[in-house]
Image (cartoon, rainbow, N blue to C red):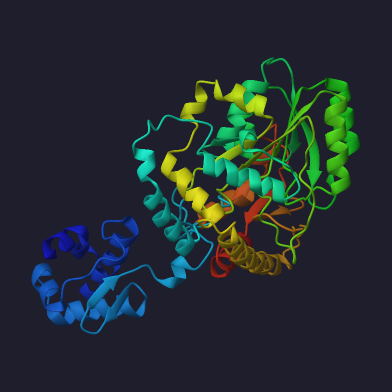
Amino acid sequence: MQRGFAAALGNWRTKEGPLARSLATAVREAVVDGRIPAGTRLPSERELARALELSRGTVVTALTRLRDDGWLHTRHGSGSVVRLPARLTERTTPWSLDRGGAGDADLDLTLAVTAAPHEAYLAALGRAVERSAALLVDSGVATAGLPRLRELLAERYTRSGLATRPEQILVTSGAQAALTLLVDRLHTDRRSPVVVESPTYPGALAILRRRRARLLPVPVTAAHGWDTERLAETVRANGPQLAYLIPDFHNPTGAHMTAPTRTAVAALAERHALTVVVDETMRDLDLRTPPGTEPHLSGARVIQIGSASKVLWSGLRIGWIRASADLVREVLRNPLQAQLSPPPLEQLIAAELLGEGDGGGDGLDAVLADRRARLRRQRDHLAGLLAGTGWTYTVPDGGLSLWLHLGEPTTATELAARAAGRGLAVSPGPLFAVDRASLAHHLRLPFTATRDVLTRAVALLTG
């Protein structure tokens, strides 16, 4: 055990500074990297000193640092156990974003993502493992999804006012996988244009560009939402067969489609034989108090896609399509479907998180309430930091980011380049534009980071 522990620390002695500090840092990094699993019981101080060829005093100092910082839990007579500190497990922000993530950036605000709900996820993982025995005697071949997960997703739609049967659900490895399968099935005439919002989610743009689809942008703003007259005019003039919309806390503007607008869009789709793919990835991230009750954008020509990545964790690669049972069967025949289907164990974990065992979703409700409260505080903190900058924005009712208008003369690309030189990575507006050039004075700034990190980030942006 002592040799294994020492080997897991790597070449820590080469770092500058006192040995005790370097040792404590090496233990923290080994825990984060998974070389020393959380829950590992450490050797005694005397044994560690012997294995690491250090004085016992140096080892005691290092362990005291770790204990004071929450990385060790010591019980008298039972020794010390490695753990992740509460400041990492009890937050919505991925720890890696505080350490950089985009190139050489010290802070990465290019990703609007959350950390897993730590305790709830570990508990769901444990229950999923207990339920996995039956999976292991089956083939493991991709299907439309595990029956229990499809039932839970169908029940969630039905409870929120959109009656759904399990056979109308196809489980995928994320929302982008769902969109890929739908575009492959629905966009069969590559000469036919596709309606998208401007701005819109870059991942969706990438999928549509790969098919060399001609894109018809329709503006959406945080303050005024969707221009239904412009949308109707675009559909009448160009005859598209497919549209991709994000009505619930739109990415990146945060706009939220009103109930009358949803009705108008569904009617427009029916009138012009337009299939509308509705991305509901952000729907549960409603930061209003209490959350609103707007209906799903639905209708005979509307297909919903969703994902667990924004609400729960990006590492849980679970998405889904909600469509007619006939369309689900057609998509299942696509050879891509097997490649874009998540592993069975991930589906079991998702089912446990969505259903909380057999508790009907009470566990997910608690997770959502906690996430919303934290994100609401972080959103308001970021808005307060930006109040004196002269940049304009609408504080969104939900989602994960603010959409800033910088005004003249600074472009977002120039500001992002300056920020990168100071160690901050951010996403300028052209990334969200159909033409990759417009929206030059806009910037997306997620509020998924901790308040301390947001404070540092705004200082780097405005300094």
Quarter holding the C terminus is bottom right
Provide residue 247's location: percent of width, then percent of height: 75, 44
For image coordinates 62% across by 28% down, the residue present is: 328
Task: Give the residue drawn at x 48%, y 43%.
Answer: 347
Pinpoint residue 73: horizontal percent, then vertical percent: 31, 76
Which quadrant holds the N terminus? bottom left
x then y, percent, for residue 159: 71, 51
Whether residue 88 sits left or right of residue 289 in the image: it is left
Q: How many marks?
A: 0
Residue occupying the far bottom of the picture: 76
Q: Splitting the image into 4 quarters, where does residue 363 fall?
A: bottom right
Would you place residue 451 above or below residue 30 in this image? below
Q: Nearer the viewer, residue 271 or 16?
A: 271
In the displayed structure image, the side of residue 211 where residue 391 appears, left or right? right
184 or 448, nearer to the observer: 184
For residue 28, above or below residue 236: below
Please name whichever residue, 52 or 267, is drawn nearer the observer in this view of the structure: 267
Residue name at image x 69 percent, y 46 percent: 157
Residue nearest the observer in this picture, 70 or 460: 70
Q: Is residue 345 visible?
A: yes
The answer to whether residue 99 shows anywhere in this view is no
Specify whether 77 is left or right of 342: left
In x, y percent, where is residue 230? 88, 34
| Residue appearing at x 79%, y 31% in the figure | 300
